[in-house]
Amino acid sequence: MSRRGSRYILGHLSFADMAALPVGAVGSLILNPDEPKALFEASKSIKAAFVKAGKGCIIKSHVMLIELEPKVWKQTHLVMITCTERDGGAQ
């Protein structure tokens, strides 16, 4: 796991870390609720990382609430990424 992260996701994972998943594995990311275009930008970056790694992926997102500090809730997205073979195609 690298130390460089993205401003679009919470935590220290990079998109290349997600692309290193074995085929069939499912990973998840929580997007930064303070970035209005996080879902759009993260989806593009995830797809690009998987293409560069020679793999495909299926991306699904779910809306969720997270508590940033006591009694302060924000809406964000939970992104589920399934690693596929390249010919499975990125969606």
Image (spheres, rainbow, N blue to C red):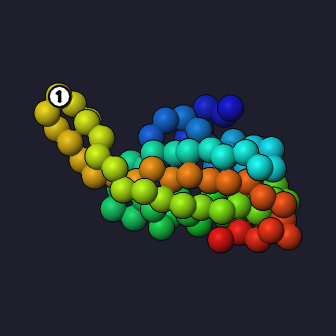
For label 1, the residue is: 70
Give x and y (percent) for residue 71: 14, 33
Residue drawn at x 48%, y 67% as measured from the top left:
40
Residue drawn at x 66%, y 34% as measured from the top left:
2
Instruction: State the image quarter where residue 52 is shown.
Output: bottom right
Residue drawn at x 45%, y 50% as measured from the top left:
78
Query: Is residue 7 visible in the rendered structure shown here?
Result: no
Q: Residue furthest top?
A: 70
Give x and y (percent) for residue 48: 69, 63
Query: Is residue 4 visible in the rendered structure shown here?
Result: yes
Crowding near pointer 1: few (<14 within 10 Å), some, many (20+)? few
Quadrant occupied by the C terminus: bottom right
- Front-lying residue, 73 or 7: 73
Tell me: 70 left or right of 44.
left
Q: Residue furthest front?
A: 24
Residue drawn at x 62%, y 44% as measured from the top left:
27
Give x and y (percent) for residue 58: 66, 62
Give x and y (percent) for residue 25: 73, 45
Circle 1: residue type? Pro
Quadrant occupied by the N terminus: top right
Tell me: 42 left or right of 31.
right
Tell me: 47 left or right of 79.
right
Looking at the image, residue 11 lies above or below residue 39: above
Q: Residue furthest left?
A: 71
Instruction: State the image quarter where residue 59 is shown.
Output: bottom right
